[in-house]
Amino acid sequence: MKISVITIAYNSANSIHDAINSVLSQSYPDIEYIIVDGLSKDKTVDIIKSYGDKITKFVSEPDKGIYDALNKGIGMA
């Protein structure tokens, strides 16, 4: 059974490494990892992109807040 993990972020350069590494360190073999970024203005997007194909789906675009971003992620799952 595939598990979808969604991380939402906005200007999270100081913490996004920890969040991504936590998900990627899981031993479950069928994880879909989705990150939704609210068009960060810091290095968040660069950090996320540095993980390459380890992130299943990634979008960085304006949203209407945390719940909108989470709903986008659910829609992508």
Image (cartoon, grey):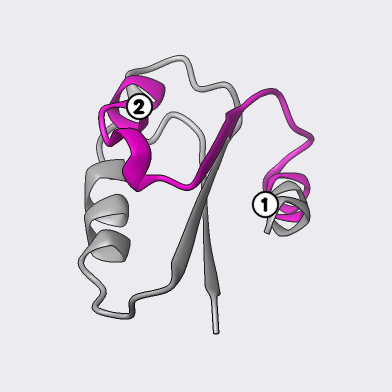
Residue 66, magenta (yes or no): yes
Task: Provide residue 44's location: percent of width, then percent of height.
Answer: 37, 27
34 vs 51: above or below: below
| Residue kind at label 1, given as amino acid type | Gly
To which residue does mark 1 refer?
73
The count of marks equals 2
Q: 28 and 61: which one is in front? A: 28
Q: What's the residue at 27%, 60% (across, down)?
A: 24
Q: What's the residue at 46%, 14% (across, down)?
A: 41
| Residue kind at label 2, given as amino acid type | Lys
Task: Provide residue 8's location: percent of width, then percent of height.
Answer: 54, 48
51 vs 2: above or below: above
**Mark 2 element type:** helix
43 vs 51: above or below: above
Q: What's the residue at 23%, 44% (across, down)?
A: 17
Q: What's the residue at 48%, 47% (across, down)?
A: 56
Q: Is residue 36 left or right of residue 30?
A: right
To which residue does mark 2 refer?
49
Quadrant of the rendered image containing residue 29 = bottom left
Quadrant of the rendered image containing residue 61 = top right
**Mark 1 element type:** helix
Residues shaded magenta: 45-71
The image quadrant where one finds the C terminus is bottom right
The image quadrant where one finds the N terminus is bottom right
Please tell me how crowded label 1 is: few (under 14), some (14-19), or many (20+) other residues with Cα within 10 Å. many
Q: Residue furthest bottom?
A: 1
